[in-house]
Image (cartoon, rainbow, N blue to C red):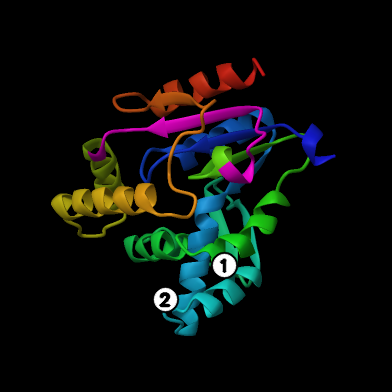
Amino acid sequence: MSQAVPVIAIDGPSGSGKGTIARRVAAALGYHLLDSGALYRLTALAAQKEGVCLDDTRALARIAAGLDIQFGSDASGDELILLNGADVTEQVRTEQTGAGASRVAALQPVRDALLGLQRTFRKPPGLVADGRDMGTHVFADAALKVFLTASAEERAQRRYKQLKGKGIDVSLAALSRDIEARDRRDSERSVAPLRPAEDARMLDSSGQSIEAVTNTVLDWARGI
């Protein structure tokens, strides 16, 4: 059954806009949505809440295997993420949680624990999955694979505006350094490194509107 369910895999580095594009594409097509990056963020967040060190591989794998999560939307249609029934949407998106996610995502036992969970999201009529190894590993048979990129400078600017809009005081220079460091970790790690699948379609979102990028992916999706 799962092989007959189409998957659109959208991979790319942090801040490339893949989460926003994935949500819009899924909504337009009526597909299910998997934010795989959130699973690693939730693992890191749950570990922080339990006081588990991020180099305790066995404990982290246990936490990943037992995640009780729900993805959805609030009354305004904005993203809603529940962990053990509690709204953690804002906590999941902090820079601290993102840095923790990058660390736990490099651990094979954690990835193994989350792999089966990710594949359960593949249900009719289809799935849009965003992450870093959706097209290369988790859904290697995806009908459409997109590798979404943007310059490090633009990704830092986007994150800066997002955080300032929430009243969070941040340094643009520090965000740029963090993004570049995360890119290196994600690309150079030995476990499922960030890279485009051989059959992925490359899409640079630098200077493009969300609508333009979404429409490009939808045009590709309608051709599969």
Ranked by sequence position, the earlier of labels 2 and 1 is 2
The amino acid pointed to by label 1 is Pro
User: Can residue 165 be seen in this snapshot?
Assistant: no
Residue annotated with mark 2: 55
Quarter assignment of residue 102: bottom left
Q: Secondary structure at mark 2?
A: loop
Quarter assignment of residue 150: top left
Determine the residue located farthest toward the right in the rendered image.
Answer: 1
Residue 93 position, x and y percent, is 41, 58
Q: Which residues are magenta?
A: 137-152
Determine the residue located farthest toward the front in the rendered image.
Answer: 190
Please tell me how crowded label 1 is: few (under 14), some (14-19), or many (20+) other residues with Cα within 10 Å: some
Quadrant location, the C terminus: top right
Q: Are marks 2 and 1 in contact (CB under 8 Å)?
A: no
Residue 2 position, x and y percent, is 79, 40
Please tell me how crowded label 2 is: few (under 14), some (14-19), or many (20+) other residues with Cα within 10 Å: few
Q: In this picture, is 151 found above or below 68?
A: above
Residue 136 position, x and y percent, is 55, 39
Residue 151 position, x and y percent, is 27, 34
213, 223: nearer the viewer: 223
100, 89: nearer the viewer: 100
Compared across the picture, whether 5 is left or right of 185 comes to: right
Q: Residue placed at 80% from the left, 32% from the top?
A: 4
Q: Residue placed at 38% from the left, 42% from the top?
A: 13
How many badges with numbers are in the image?
Answer: 2
Q: Residue placed at 52% from the left, 48% from the top?
A: 78
44, 166: nearer the viewer: 44
Residue annotated with mark 1: 109
Compared across the picture, whether 162 is left or right of 203 comes to: left
The amino acid pointed to by label 2 is Asp
Q: Is residue 146 magenta?
A: yes
Q: In this picture, is 214 found above or below 195?
A: above
